[in-house]
Amino acid sequence: MKLRESLNDLGWALKNQFTASPPTPPPPFDRSRSALKKLKGQALARRDELSERYDLSSWPLACWPEEIPEALWLLDLLDRQVVPRAPEGPCLDVGSKNWSYLPALRAAVPLEWTGVELDAHRRYMNLVTRRAVAERRARTVGESRYVTGSLQGIRGEFGLITWLLPFVTPAPHDSWGLPRRFYDPPGMLRHAASLLRPGGLMLVVNMGEEEAVAQRKLFEDHGLAAAPLGEIRSAFAPYRKPRFGWLLEKPPGA
Ligand SMILES: C[S@@+](CC[C@H](N)C(=O)[O-])C[C@H]1O[C@@H](n2cnc3c(N)ncnc32)[C@H](O)[C@@H]1O
């Protein structure tokens, strides 16, 4: 484990030393558009329902074909759990990676979005960074801002916070290549909850039952009464491991 931690520290220092990125190529519009169209059965019916109510026109400009099923999965979840609660802005997405699902966030909740990502300078094979990819998407869908850094550096008040797949156990954090000094699930949850404005909502999604159990304990330890959404079932099934959700509503007078 010590070796892994040392390698993560070294990798971190290197990637944060040289952060410039070549320009990112645009997604292949025709292939992305056909990924959005070529659905079958329940997925097709649900896509039709969603596209009647939400504007998906920017998706082929912002998403790669393989990202479309996950974006539809998230739009479906937001439509069922978040949109009916009429969230207000501004909105924050925690741990945004390359923000592949930003088009779903903006379609469901067309307010101002900030995405924060600690590991934004990670590179793809073509040497383009996550940050460059995410910033391109933010420009494409509009009213979105990608911030490089830790959640703990974010200030302000948000009406909606989305947090998809937080690291709540150490192993995924380590295999992501992050230095151990950044592993602080209680501190991160405390800070995220402090950013919610009265009446605000926080949607958390975990991968697998073990992480959902760890997430429940974190909420309980902080006295946060998050409602469990249970296993998230959907007509879109892009994941092998089940997802579990939570919805935290900050009381209006808090
Ligand atoms: C499992 S990934 C999930 C990425 C993305 N939300 C998704 O669903 O595809 C967790 C992300 O959280 C980021 N992260 C970890 N600690 C963070 C922190 N303190 N502030 C901001 N992002 C952080 C990681 O770098 C990683 O990109």
Image (cartoon, rainbow, N blue to C red):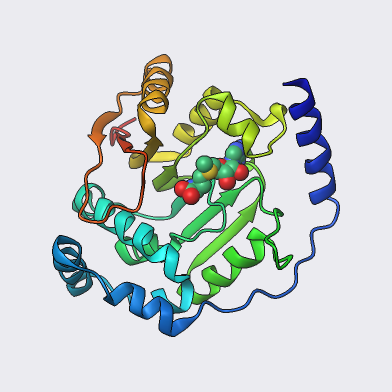
- Expressed as whole percent of the image width and height from the top left, the position of residue 242 reads 32, 38
Query: What x and y, as percent, mark residue 19?
Result: 79, 59
The C terminus, quarter of image: top left
Q: Is residue 23 above or below residue 155?
A: below
**Residue extending furthest toward the bottom:** 30
Can residue 93 be seen by looking at this rendering?
no
Residue 69: which quarter of the image? bottom left
Report if residue 211 is visible in the image.
yes
Image x and y of residue 51, in percent:
22, 72
- Say whether residue 42 is left or right of residue 87: left
Left or right: 41 as drawn, with respect to 221: left
Residue 27 vertical placement versus 245 (above, below): below
* Residue lying at the far top of the rendered structure: 221
Which residue occupies the foreground of this view, 61 or 218?
61
Residue shown at 25% from the left, 41% from the top: 232
Residue at x 35%, y 73% (from the top left corner): 35
Image quarter for residue 106? bottom left
* Ligand 1 quadrant in view: top right
Quarter holding the N terminus is top right
Q: Nearer the viewer, residue 42 or 218?
A: 42
Side (left or right) of 1 relative to 201? right
Q: How far from the left and from the top, in percent, is residue 146?
A: 58, 59
Q: Residue at x 41, y 25 (%)?
A: 215
* Front position in the image: 81 or 157: 81
| Quadrant housing residue 33 | bottom left
Q: Left or right: where does residue 22 sit relative to residue 110?
A: right
Q: Residue at x 52, y 32 (%)?
A: 167
